[in-house]
């Protein structure tokens, strides 16, 4: 009996020892994290949940160069690194990266008074490479550390035109946009991929049930005068655009907004009347300050001094403009995105034409320009040791606007004849030195909505042009020595006479006009051309006071062309200025229906099919004569570095510099 008792006790002791030692023997080794080879020290150990490693938020964000902020009231983590914005919430599997939301495999958790975040998600969102080494239970993170650049110096651009008005919700010309795009920021910005990303708003969400967009503003955004930019300013900007007295071109951006509401200083909501697939992409509009314009009647905004001395939340502020000579922008000391711009000043120097500007670039008076096409080969050869040259397909096109209320041009057969009568491939060869592609409708290859089938290429065909003009009732009278066409072919009938406008100093458009005059005369059109100062020509364009006008167009971030071709955008205001951007006064019921349908679905395949059909109709009806998409050759002196080139060629009006650029001057002064 005693022996059995001793055996039993011995077995119990063995089991007890085994139970005590099991946890020690079964415990996994601790998880290690290294960043660029250095051990990441944390006061709370990393842990694994659902196969994901979580680490203390402050440790990982700061190791990757991001500033991190904790909002106790909402349990929200906000991390910013230069233009990047990462937003997470404790216990939520929804996160935001540079604006749009993403779903996490595991939510942030609280452990030992510390907030832990999913390591791989955070690191990859900030561009790092993450690997798991199973043998040592180590997560390795590799990223490129930020290297500060020299601060200071001046970059000088050339300009052919004077800015007209620097109020971002009113301006329509690229000369103004080139300036106010650096001064004013909108809720969203264009990324290098041309998709919407964070700006003044660091995140957003869409609720289909209530047709409501919610935007959260960065709490640290300030205007250049030091005043905070809040939800009140955003609401004021949009309410101004929707006001009955507003006479600018931006109403189309917010056309379907039924109500704007705010929650505190940093949340703004837009309730829409209907789905608007392009709404988010259209919110690049610069925000205007309520504390300056809030008491100014909307009808007086265009004439207000703000349009000459704007205040914005962008990286630069306007220092001064000397009309006819230059405009100077200065680094904004209150810019809220770290780091602030490296370059101290940006100068836009005015030149009488592109050839004079080209000469200024070659001697170093300006640092950056689009090289005149017929000088590309020579300039590249002669400046190869001190300048860099890049070929960038433009996200825009040049065209000849046609006034659809003109007694001659309202006939589609005439418009088609004029296009057949112009040798556009020869224009690309001879005027652009081959640096371009002939286009035949609105959607460009740089757009996801491009590729409409069965487009007429309008190959150069003077005989077809003559046939169409005959059919339209414009014939050369029998025996006429001048060869000009007259209405109904009567010797005493109205002469077929058209004038082509182009802006002074633009030698490319001057050459296009000269070629069109010559080739249209060959088919019996009494064509002429005239150059106007940019502001004068723009005023004529906005009031449709022209026959034919040569200009360029840059589509927006979204392929929706509603603003350009819908008949609602061809309504004149009290001063005869067209209230939209349909300055050719093109009206077509089926195009209207399709453009409205394109805004009511967010399905990309459906929208692509709709815009293909729109392109086919435009290709037949010809609201204007499409010319070409340029291949821009950008020349930049080598002391200017940190450039990210994208196919945006000046950018959609008001979008300004594309985020991702960090231009600086080598040596910090010049």
Image (cartoon, rainbow, N blue to C red):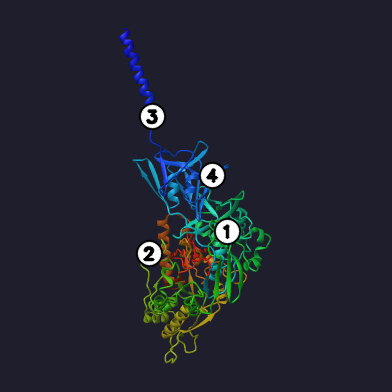
**4 or 2: tag closer to the N-terminus:** 4
Question: Are discs 4 and 2 less than 8 Å apart at CB?
Answer: no
The residues bearing labels 1 and 3 have C-alpha atoms spaced at a distance of 55 Å
Secondary element type, mark 3: helix
**4 or 3: tag closer to the N-terminus:** 3
Question: Are discs 1 and 3 less than 8 Å apart at CB?
Answer: no
| Disc assigned to residue 24 | 3
The residues bearing labels 2 and 1 have C-alpha atoms spaced at a distance of 41 Å
Question: Are discs 4 and 1 less than 8 Å apart at CB?
Answer: no
Q: Which residue is mark 2?
A: 451
Residue 196, horizontal then vertical, whole percent:
48, 57
Q: Which residue is mark 4?
A: 76
Secondary element type, mark 4: strand
Secondary element type, mark 2: loop
Decide if residue 503 is in sight here.
Answer: yes
**4 or 1: tag closer to the N-terminus:** 4
Residue 585, horizontal then vertical, whole percent:
52, 71
The answer to which of 404 and 656 lies nearer the viewer is 656
| Disc assigned to residue 335 | 1
Q: Nearer the viewer, mark 2 or mark 1?
A: 1
């Amino acid at each position: 009996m005693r022996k059995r008792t001793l055996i039993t006790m011995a077995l119990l002791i063995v089991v007890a020892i085994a139970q005590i030692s099991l946890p020690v023997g079964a415990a996994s080794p601790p998880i290690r994290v290294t960043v660029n080879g250095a051990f990441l020290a944390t006061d709370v150990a990393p842990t694994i949940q659902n196969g994901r490693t979580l680490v203390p938020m402050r440790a990982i964000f700061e190791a990757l160069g991001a500033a991190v902020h904790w909002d106790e009231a909402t349990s929200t983590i906000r991390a910013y690194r230069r233009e990047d914005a990462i937003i997470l919430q404790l216990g939520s599997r929804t996160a935001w990266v540079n604006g749009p939301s993403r779903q996490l495999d595991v939510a942030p958790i609280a452990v030992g008074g510390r907030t832990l975040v999913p390591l791989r998600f955070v690191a990859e969102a900030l561009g790092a490479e993450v690997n798991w080494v199973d043998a040592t239970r180590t997560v390795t993170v590799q990223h490129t550390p930020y290297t500060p650049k020299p601060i200071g110096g001046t970059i000088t651009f050339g300009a052919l035109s004077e800015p007209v008005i620097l109020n971002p919700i009113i301006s329509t010309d690229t000369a103004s946009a080139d300036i106010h795009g650096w001064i004013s920021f909108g809720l969203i910005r264009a990324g290098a991929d041309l998709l919407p990303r964070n700006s003044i708003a660091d995140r957003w969400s869409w609720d289909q049930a209530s047709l409501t967009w919610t935007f959260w503003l960065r709490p640290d955004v300030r205007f250049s005068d030091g005043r905070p930019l809040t939800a009140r300013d955003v609401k004021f900007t949009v309410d101004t655009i929707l006001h009955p007295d507003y006479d600018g071109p931006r109403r189309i951006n917010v056309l379907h907004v039924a109500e704007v509401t705010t929650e505190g200083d940093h949340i703004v909501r837009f309730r829409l009347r209907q789905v608007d697939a392009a709404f988010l992409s259209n919110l690049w509009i610069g925000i205007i300050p309520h504390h300056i314009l809030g008491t100014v009647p909307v009808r007086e905004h265009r004439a207000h001094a703000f349009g000459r001395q704007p205040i914005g939340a962008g990286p630069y502020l306007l220092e001064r403009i000397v009309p006819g000579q230059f405009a100077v922008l200065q680094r904004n000391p209150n810019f809220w995105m770290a780091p602030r711009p490296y370059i101290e000043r940006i100068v836009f120097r005015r030149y009488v034409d592109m050839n004079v500007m080209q000469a200024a670039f070659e001697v170093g008076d300006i640092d950056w320009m689009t090289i005149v096409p017929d000088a590309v080969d020579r300039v590249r050869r002669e400046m190869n040791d001190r300048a860099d040259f890049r070929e960038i397909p433009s996200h825009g096109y040049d065209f000849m606007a046609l006034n659809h209320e003109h007694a001659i041009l309202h006939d589609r057969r005439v418009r088609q004849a004029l296009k057949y009568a112009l040798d556009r491939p020869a224009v690309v060869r001879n005027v652009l030195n081959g640096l371009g592609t002939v286009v035949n409708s609105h959607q460009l290859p740089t757009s996801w909505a491009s590729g409409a089938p069965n487009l007429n290429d309008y190959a150069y065909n003077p005989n077809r042009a003559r046939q169409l003009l005959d059919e339209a009732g414009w014939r050369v009278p029998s025996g006429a020595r001048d060869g000009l066409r007259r209405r109904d072919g009567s010797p005493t009938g109205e002469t077929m006479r058209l004038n082509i406008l182009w802006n002074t100093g633009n030698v490319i458009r001057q050459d296009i006009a000269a070629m069109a005059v010559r080739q249209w005369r060959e088919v019996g059109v009494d064509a002429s051309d005239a150059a106007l100062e940019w502001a004068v020509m723009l005023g004529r364009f906005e009031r449709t006071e022209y026959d034919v006008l040569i200009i360029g167009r840059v589509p927006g971030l979204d392929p929706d062309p509603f603003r350009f071709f819908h008949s609602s955008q061809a309504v004149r205001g009290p001063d005869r200025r067209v209230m939209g951007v349909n300055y050719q006064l093109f009206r077509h019921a089926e195009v209207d229906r399709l453009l409205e349908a394109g805004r009511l679905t967010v399905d990309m395949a459906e929208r692509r099919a709709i815009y293909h059909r729109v392109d086919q109709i435009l290709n037949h009806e010809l609201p204007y004569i499409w010319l070409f998409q340029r291949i821009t050759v950008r020349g930049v002196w080598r002391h200017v570095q940190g450039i990210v080139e994208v196919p945006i060629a000046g950018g959609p009006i008001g979008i300004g510099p594309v985020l991702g650029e960090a231009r600086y001057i080598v040596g910090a002064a010049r």
